[in-house]
Amino acid sequence: MKNTYIIIAAIVVIVIIIGGVFAYIYASAPAKKSTSTLAAATVNGAGGTLVYPLMTVWQGAYGSAEPQITVNYNPVGSGTGITDFTKQLEDFGESDAPMTAAQYAALPSGTTALTIPISASAVVPAYNIKLANGTVAQNGLKFTGAVLADIFLGTITKWNDPKITALNPGIPLPDTLITTVHRSDGSGTMFAFTNFLYDSSSTWASQVGKPSTSPAWPSAPAQIAAPKNAGVAAAISETNGAIGPLEIAYILENTGQTSLYYGTVQNAAGNYILASVTNIAAALQAGAAAGLPAGNAAWTSVSIVNNIFNDTAATSVYPIVTLTYALVYQNQNYNSRSYAESAATVNFLSWIVNSGQSLGKGLGYVPLPANIVSVDDATLKLITYNGTPIS
Amino acid sequence: MQFKLLRGDTILKILLAAAALFIIGLLVALAVELYLGASASIYKFGPAFLIGSKWIPSQNILGALPFIYGTLLTSAIAIIIGLPISLGVAIFISEKLKSHQTFGYLLGTIVDLLAAVPSVIYGLWGILILAPLLRDYVEKPLHNSLGFIPLFSGTPYGFNFFTAGIILAIMIIPTISAVSIDVLNAVPNSQREAMYSLGATEWEVTQKSVLPYARSGIFGAFILGLGRAVGETMAVTMVIGNIPTITANLFSPGYTLSSLIANEFGESSGLYESAIIEIGLILFLVALLINVFARLLLWRMTRGTQVKV
């Protein structure tokens, strides 16, 4: 009797497995033959983690458009992405911050690095505060750059500090200690956030210094650092009175979080803006209109945050936005790379800055505005293989 | 005769010796590679690196002391809490459940399963469940009632040395218990019977006969657990708060050597990268020193005992 049951169970399991395998084969079978002229090749990239979720979507969609080309992406972090690129280990590097002067100096002699913005994101002040009336503070608390700087400098320590209540009349902010949360690992999110604080507060600029992916955070009375956006989000949502910079994609993806809300930030025109896909795109548009360098020039000082910081005409832009960049060599013939690999790299990058942009919306990535895409297209035209243009 | 060279025993001996030498070679290669990677930092900072208490990579002010302190403190908390519980579990299963073999076997299997859970799982559970629970039901009551003791003086936020120590304790308990159970089970029954025949109580048998007989094996289990605590990375990173601090206050966020490497290696370059490799070298040496110290202790303890496991 017992054996019969086991046999029946085994048969059921086997049928399910075989059925699953057939369903899988059937689902993945109709891979369309590409009409493209590109030869089969593998494109390897490495860099920041910010763009990684979007990159996996791109890999899938590009894989059905050009099935003969395989794209691999290793999310090692922006710093390692640039180092590997400098050592010519990858087909493209990726970084959330533009290359620094020292990183440009470390490039092999005679080579030119091209910087290509491929996606963008925004950083929001996320918080979890139990108000004096017992309810939890919802989205939309108002912050200015100066107040955020004071909070992270440790000079504003309580939620009912006059500087915060003055911005938020009518909200019963409690006498709770502010716990600041930031990333424990280096991150482009922190670069954009400290860039904004650097512009907003001279005290921050003199105490903490230039924007950095891993800044020297001043010591605040209560302070936590957690790994990745997920760690920061968890630390905020588990701590009453916590505030921390969080990437907008993370908030938009996790709409189910019950104790994680985010505030508005005052822009140059004096308006308090709650980050959304529309006003982030507007910020990128305005920032790029202020001028971007040519793709083969140094991008070290490029900052959308700086470009829109004093742009009082941009009334409805969200002020803390950042680009993330792909890095490629202008002459693609290095480390005995083949023409096929070079052509595939250029084709992939061209595909992501044009066709790929709309795929990020569901994940909270903002499509690049037209004026940045046209800069990218011009940059991609500069790429050569032994002096011959590729695209 | 040439045949003698090919005798099975000789070949086996050579293969085994090669395997043993491979391990030694690996250890030496690891140490040399770490030293070479760290040499830029060692040359620049010298011994001051070990006692420096500030970590500001952008200004090249780098000191390892808060991280060494964090590693030692969290491991100590883990051992103080974890060791008695592990021994309790092991003694209960191997001594008290002798007559209920099925239940003992079931419990032993659960312990083995826990020992195999990946550390990132413990970390996720720690950040989402354990940290808030400990904060509300352990740390706050301790702070409110015993806040005058420096250990408990800070306001608890859940992400601190204490939580990291507790999660490490939870992680090493299965390791220490699993090995200790096997060691205790290996104690011959004649040891116990001899004591019973003298009219000893159950506890006296365990305390005076079984534990002394098994202590070198239990010590091995302890070393394994301590090794896991010192080297553990992800679970600790998620709950310790990652702020370099040296304080007696257990409710303050801290930082450990391995967490620092996990957090910052990816974004480092140049001297900063070299300093992080030196942190790795220090972690290697701390683990080595703990091991050597424990061996010496064990050697002192077992001197004069006739029987060994």
Image (cartoon, coloured by chain):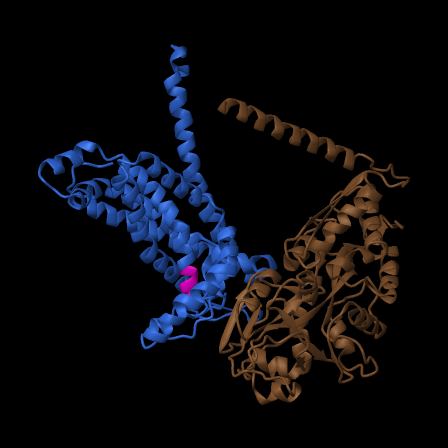
Number of labelled discs? 0
Q: Is residue B127 left or right of residue B199?
A: right
Q: Is residue A269 left or right of residue A257?
A: right
Q: Which chain is brown?
A: A
Residue B281 position within the rendered picture, expressed as x and y whole percent measured from the top left? 45, 54
Which stretch is magenta?
B161-165
**In this view, A235 is above or below A86:** below
For the question of whether residue B304 can be seen, the reply is yes
Q: Residue at x 35, y 46 (%)?
A: B176
Toward the front, the furthest residue is A1
Q: Residue at x 73, y 35 (%)?
A: A24
Residue A55 position within the rendered picture, expressed as x and y whole percent measured from the top left? 73, 52
**In this view, A150 is above or below B181:** below
Residue B176 lies in the magenta stretch: no
Residue B47 position within the rendered picture, expressed as x and y whole percent measured from the top left? 41, 64
Nearest the camera: A113 or B69? B69
**In this view, B29 is above or below B12:** below
**In this view, B23 is above or below B60:** above
Q: Residue at x 33, y 74 (%)?
A: B145
For the question of whether residue B47 can be seen, the reply is no
Residue B96 position within the rendered picture, expressed as x and y whole percent measured from the top left? 25, 41
Q: Quadrant of residue A203?
A: bottom right
Q: Is residue B249 left or right of residue A121?
A: left
Q: Colour of chain B?
A: blue
| Main SS category, magenta section | helix
Q: Quadrant of residue A5?
A: top right
Toward the left, the furthest residue is B198
Nearest the camera: A155 or A142? A142
Q: Residue at x 36, y 70 (%)?
A: B142
